[in-house]
Image (cartoon, rainbow, N blue to C red):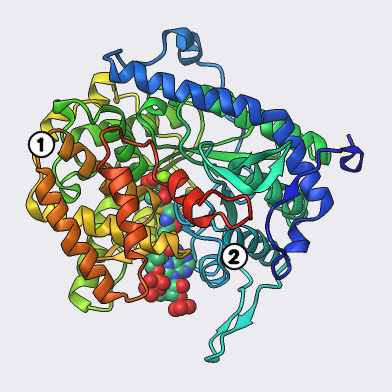
């Protein structure tokens, strides 16, 4: 099918920005419109199913591996597609928003993969979204070099990381693009614009259009992505099976459908990734009303907690059984200018990666170029010249749904400092996000939309179970709001405080803070809600 024959015109509800016309071409918008026409309704239905499933679990329905797909899990014959060029050895993957400086640094970092993130690490202002696409296009075309006004030169090296792109999740809309009178699903915008402009260019360069898919809740959402890939390839005349996608297992409902998710995407799958921060967020969000799921301070819930071990071991076992890569998660510590703090951060990251290599992971994520050597050294020790350890099937691992939910052994009340830290982190992160930054370093840790969600839902959970009283939260909120304003006079303290009160202190927990914050604060077209 020729794209020029399409009439799925998408309307842009934003003032033209610098070079935006290079991305928002009529053909690219038609392509996105075609995807919206084909998949927007199904997305809507799947979001309704998310709500229904949340209600079922909240009213006591058990969570388990689906009976309906027993045959898929029992069938030993199927495997995912073989690794595509540039995705065989993934021992270190660096992540970051698709900004110019980050792009050059990440591509040059020595990591095998750069995961350019429109999701957790990006505040989706319209400029960030379109400039992010320009950054990727310029990086692929190798015209991204620049020099700062201070004279620091950024030059792409000869050996660069393989590019993987993470579009926003299914729950979000892009309100600056309208199709058929409705905002276009954000996932289709990020995927569609990148695929339209860059898929063939990546293939011509000996690589391919590769993706990382966030926040899926079940196999039907994986099937939807697979259908998006099939149609997108067909529309652009790209051979079916060229796309590769690594799915983040970062919701508790997806954890019991890992194998089905691989199955749905098998012709396009490049494995699974342990999205540990969203996973923890999902667990609290889904079962936060239950007293046995009361979690202590965030710092005390580590990857060695039995329920987190069950999750990561199941992920490795599932991937390797199906010939797929298992990619580890993000240790939140980032390098520090203080030598002692830096040593401690590196040691923590090293331990985390050592645990992952022992579990059988084939590679892992880092948040900062300064962590690439640590991660690489740990994986080099175990892998040597082998590109991965997929052959290490973890037949010894037996994980039940009860193991994934065995939070009781870790549960407990928060400390006052734990409550304060969550409030401080949520406020500071919300402020950065409203001002256009989706990833920041706070108190020595990388914070992004997933980690901030944990801070928010912990406060909600503790209030709900009266592990902390409302008066104390209000007092700490006053103190932390004042501290934020004193430290950053430009901080949007009133808006940030109101956002916190709406999303962390309401009786009903909103599933995400981002849709509320996005439509109130980031949408800039004349029809935007105030
Ligand atoms: C839960 C999840 O979803 S994890 C995945 C999503 N989250 C992320 O991707 C976060 C990635 N990390 C980051 O964005 C950053 O590391 C931050 C925001 C946490 C800290 O960034 P900074 O405050 O700039 O750190 P710092 O000052 O130490 O940076 C030093 C240099 O490293 C660069 N750098 C830092 N992190 C990255 C990165 N992830 N990729 C590329 N370059 C990076 C900086 O640009 C800076 O470059 P420069 O010397 O050329 O100016
Ligand atoms: O996306 C990663 C996560 O940990 O969340
Ligand atoms: Mg995540």
Q: Name the residue beneath numbered marker 2.
A: 160
Residue 372 visible, this angle: no
Vertical order, 423 against 286 (above or below): below
Quadrant of image for the N terminus: top right
Counting every numbered tag in the picture gives 2
Badge 1 residue CB within 8 Å of ligand 2: no
Which residue is nearer to you in this view: 195 or 383? Answer: 195
Neighbours of disc 1 within 10 Å: few (<14), some (14-19), many (20+): few
Tell me what residue is drawn at x 31 percent, y 62 percent.
Answer: 428
Q: Ligand 1, what quadrant?
A: bottom left
Residue 78 falls left or right of residue 438? right
Q: Distance of mark 1 from mark 2, alpha carbons?
A: 51 Å
Tell me what residue is drawn at x 18 percent, y 60 percent.
Answer: 478
Tell me what residue is drawn at x 80 percent, y 55 percent.
Answer: 25
Residue 116's spot in the image, x, y percent? 54, 56
Residue 518 falls left or right of residue 456? right
User: Helix, strand or loop at disc 1?
Assistant: loop
Tell me what residue is drawn at x 42 percent, y 27 percent.
Answer: 254
Say which label, 1 or 2, has the lower sequence index.
2
Vertical order, 283 against 210 (above or below): above
Residue 505's spot in the image, x, y percent? 25, 43
Q: Name the residue beneath numbered marker 1.
A: 466
């Amino acid at each position: 099918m020729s794209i020029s024959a399409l009439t799925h015109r998408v309307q842009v509800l934003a003032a033209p920005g610098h070079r935006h016309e290079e991305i928002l071409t009529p053909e690219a918008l038609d392509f996105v419109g075609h995807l919206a026409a084909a998949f927007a309704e199904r997305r809507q239905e799947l979001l309704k199913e998310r709500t229904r499933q949340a209600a079922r679990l909240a009213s006591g329905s058990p969570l388990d591996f689906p009976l309906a797909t027993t045959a898929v899990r029992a069938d030993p014959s199927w495997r995912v597609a073989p690794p595509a060029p540039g995705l065989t050895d993934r021992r270190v993957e660096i992540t970051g928003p698709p900004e110019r400086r980050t792009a050059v640094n990440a591509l040059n970092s020595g990591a095998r993969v750069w995961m350019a993130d429109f999701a957790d690490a990006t505040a989706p202002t319209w400029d960030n979204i379109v400039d992010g696409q320009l950054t990727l296009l310029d990086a692929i075309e190798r015209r991204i070099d620049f020099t700062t006004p201070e004279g620091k030169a950024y030059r792409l090296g000869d050996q660069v990381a393989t590019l993987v792109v993470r579009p926003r999740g299914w729950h979000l809309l892009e309100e600056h693009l309208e199709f058929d009178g409705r905002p276009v699903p954000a996932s289709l915008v990020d995927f569609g614009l990148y695929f339209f402009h860059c898929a063939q260019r990546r293939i011509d360069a000996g690589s391919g259009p590769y993706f990382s898919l966030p926040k899926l809740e079940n196999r039907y959402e994986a099937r939807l992505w697979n259908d998006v890939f099939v149609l997108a390839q067909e529309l652009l005349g790209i051979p079916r099976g060229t796309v590769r996608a690594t799915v983040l297992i970062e919701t508790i409902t997806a954890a019991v459908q890992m194998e089905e998710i691989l199955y749905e995407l098998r012709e396009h799958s490049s494995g699974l990734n342990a999205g540990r921060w969203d996973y923890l967020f999902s667990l609290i969000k889904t079962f936060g009303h239950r007293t046995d799921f009361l979690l202590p301070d965030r710092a005390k819930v580590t990857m060695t907690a039995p329920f987190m071990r069950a999750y990561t071991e199941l992920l490795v076992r599932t991937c390797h059984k199906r010939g797929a890569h298992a990619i580890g998660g993000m240790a939140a510590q980032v390098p520090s200018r203080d030598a002692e703090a830096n040593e401690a951060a590196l040691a923590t990251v090293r331990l985390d990666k050592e645990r992952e290599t022992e579990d059988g992971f084939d590679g892992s994520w880092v948040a900062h170029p300064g962590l690439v050597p640590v991660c690489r050294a740990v994986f080099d020790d175990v892998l040597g010249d082998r590109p991965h350890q997929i052959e290490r099937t973890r037949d010894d691992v037996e994980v039940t749904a009860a193991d994934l939910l065995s939070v009781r052994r870790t549960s407990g009340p928060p400390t006052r400092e734990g409550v304060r830290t969550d409030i401080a982190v949520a406020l500071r992160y919300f402020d950065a996000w409203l001002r256009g930054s989706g990833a920041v370093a706070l108190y020595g840790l990388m914070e992004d939309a997933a980690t901030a969600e944990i801070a928010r839902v912990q406060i909600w959970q503790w209030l709900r179970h009266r592990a902390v009283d409302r008066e104390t939260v209000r007092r700490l909120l006053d103190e932390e709001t004042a501290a934020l304003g004193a430290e950053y006079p430009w901080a949007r303290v009133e808006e940030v405080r109101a956002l916190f009160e709406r999303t962390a202190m309401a009786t009903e927990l909103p599933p995400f803070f981002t849709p509320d914050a996005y439509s109130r604060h980031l949408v800039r077209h004349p029809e935007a809600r105030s």
